[in-house]
Image: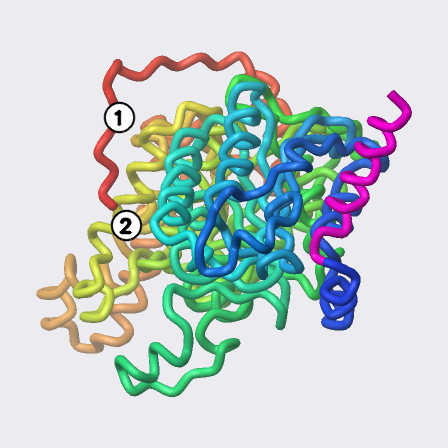
Amino acid sequence: MADRLADLEERRREARAAGGAAAIERHHAKGKMTARERIEYLLDEGTFTELDMLSRHGASGMGLEDSRPYTDGVITGFGLIDGRRVCVFSQDFTVFGGALGETHGAKIHKIMDLALATGVPVIGLNDGAGARIQEGVAALNAYGGIFRRNAAASGVVPQVSVILGPCAGGAVYSPALTDFVVMVKDTSHMFITGPDVVRTVTGEVVTLEELGGAQTHATKSGVANFVLADERSALDEVRYLLSFLPSNNLEEAPLVATDDPADRVCEDLRSLLPTSANQPYDMKKVITSIVDDGDYLEVHAGWAQQITCGFARVGGHSVGIVGNQPAVLAGVLDIDSSEKAARFVRTCDAFNVPIISLVDVPGFMPGTDQEYGGIIRHGAKLLYAFCEATVPRIGIITRKAYGGAYVVMNSKSIGADLVFAWPSAELAVMGSSGAVEIVYRRDLAEADDPARRRAELVDEYEERYATPYIAAERGFVDDVIDPADTRRVLVRSLELLRAKREDLPKRKHGNVPL
């Protein structure tokens, strides 16, 4: 037995250094952690249990038969994050450049199956060169197995992809199918085809960073939900993110104790809004004022900034927040902001996280670019997302709520459970100036002083129609509240709505306007 144990330990030592000392040293020289170091940093200390450590590929041809390192370039297993079970895989760039082959893929399949069977989040630490060319179609088949499992796990367990190096070609589709993508500045890259191919096919000259860097995907494509300065910060962000989510769709997110009083009065909100309805303000100040301890994790912070989405807690319970951002393009809804918010709403609904909408929206973005780009279809995504959501939904109208955009932003008419308005709220088909120009066109044309008459009519319209009280009279908002009472109202409302139960008609699935 002693000899067998010694043999086992030798094999384990070989597996732990599968890439070799030189490869590990080169990896460290780039300022990057190894696959194992990343797992050790991510998980609670001493909790990682590795699976399939001694796996090796059985491929032959093109020189592979002479190189059969243990692990086959990916570390898989399970452990704890803040005492909660998770499954994880971490690609090892020091072994075959992290390229995925049949055995590599099979290990990922197994850990994803285990996560789904046990109802725990799955975290992928991606750092690989794509499909292993030497294994040909077997590698492609392995990718297909990952994609199918990503789809099967979607909405069942949280899936987080952390990009810690190259992720190219077919490899990008697994992260794209997961709930959240985390990238690192300067070292993370994602693209379908690299700069050389782009230049050959289209003639465009673009750098690796411009084409698929973290900032590109955080601000232009919307692929990256979070961008961090270094690997450790990225892994810290994953731990923080998971604290807002349940382990699976049958559970609730963890309750986190807070010393922030549930009945705290938010005095600052009484003076936050500018005197003019055309002046901007920062909706994030509203959010940090009303949530526990001002703690707000924004998702997609750099993309479509005219809407803000993120996680927070109210009374210790996780909530998802969707708020128009008047400080950027007046908070208007366009193609990107509609898609960003729709994705976030569906994520919250999948994982039992109540949704709070903060509404100050002047409408949808006009223009041929928006119309040709499909603003109708993309705006309908957000409408669909709110309509199908069964989690508790609360709306707070702070200022402008105009036209179809008001309806889309979680209005009572599309199923919001409770909607409250501040006295500054303006609920109308359109802004007062535009409405006066249409409704009183003849009156203005016949007026001796059209400018003076227009001003009088605008004042009259705002006083009579652009107020929350008509909506309150009709039950379209449940109450008009003092802004300072917003937190207190939210805490009480969420306590009630935690008992909410809603059953949708049985069907295979809806046909979301993709």
Location of residue 88 (image quadrant): top right
Toward the right, the furthest residue is 2
Residue at 26% in and 68% down: 454
Residue 11 counted in the magenta span: yes
* Predominant SS along the magenta part: helix
Q: Quadrant of the N terminus?
A: top right
Nearest the eye: 70 or 436: 70
What's the amino acid at mark 2?
Answer: Gly
Marks 1 and 2 sit apart, C-alpha to C-alpha, by 20 Å
Nearest the eye: 240 or 465: 240
Q: What element carries label 1?
A: loop
Residue at 51% in and 59% down: 63
Q: Give the range drawn in magenta.
A: 1-19
Residue 283's place in the image compared with 427, above or below, is below
Nearest the eye: 473 or 205: 205
Residue assigned mark 2: 379
Nearer-N-terminus badge (1/2): 2
Q: Position of residue 119 (x, y in %)?
A: 56, 21
Residue 461 in sight from this viewpoint: yes
Q: Where is residue 365 in the image (x, y as percent from the top left)?
A: 29, 63
User: How many residues crowd mark 1 within 10 Å: few (<14), some (14–19), many (20+)?
Assistant: few
Q: Where is residue 392 in the image (x, y as percent from the top left)?
A: 48, 25
Residue at 56% in and 62% down: 281
Residue 304 in sight from this viewpoint: no
Is 22 on the left-hand or right-hand side of 121? right
Q: Residue 509 carries which label?
A: 1
What's the amino acid at mark 1?
Answer: His
Residue 479's place in the image compared with 124, above or below, is above
